[in-house]
Amino acid sequence: MTPTPTKGFTLIEVLVALSIIAVTLAAGMRAAGAISDNAQRLTDVMAAQWCAENELTGLRLSRQFPGVGDATFTCEQLGRSFSGALVTRPTPNPNFRRVEAVVADERGRTLFNVSTVLGRY
């Protein structure tokens, strides 16, 4: 009489399958975390861009020729507070100024940086 083969998986096969599933789930969780972090970063950069553009637009609308020097500003966007700096430098043509707006988050990390040229007239 020959032994009948058993049907099913051995313990080793089950452990290998579980380890493969665990590695796959860990990779999926890491990818989901990276997507979430990127979405938050994109939101922060977009809000910082709004702050910088608002400051530069305010300078354009004031129709005053900016003096050379540095100035700071704060901005509230999407319920968060951003700090920024306006850096105004001369250009070779005395009728123009180069203005750079740098916006940082609460930790002081630069999120957005944009430059423009403003004219005297």
Image (cartoon, rainbow, N blue to C red):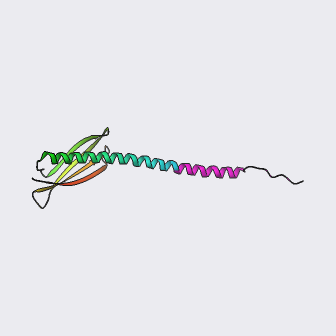
The image position of residue 118, as x and y in percent, is 15, 53
Count the labels in the image: 0
Magenta region, main secondary structure? helix
The image position of residue 115, as x and y in percent, is 22, 54
The image position of residue 40, as x and y in percent, is 38, 45
Q: Residue at horizontal 63%, vertical 49%? A: 18
Q: Residue furthest right?
A: 1
- Whether residue 30 is visible, yes or no, is yes
In magenta segment, residue 68? no
Query: Could you tell whether 59 is left or right of 33 in the image?
Result: left
Query: Could you tell whether 101 is left or right of 10 in the image?
Result: left
- Whether residue 104 is visible, yes or no, is no
Q: Residue at horizontal 51%, vertical 47%? A: 29
Q: Residue at horizontal 31%, vertical 49%? A: 111
In magenta segment, residue 24? yes
Query: Could you tell whether 82 is left or right of 65 in the image?
Result: right
User: Is 112 in front, or is 7?
Assistant: 7
Q: Please provide the residue range marked out in magenta.
A: 1-27
Q: Residue at horizontal 19%, vertical 47%? A: 57
User: Is 120 in front, or is 27?
Assistant: 120
Q: Residue furthest top?
A: 79
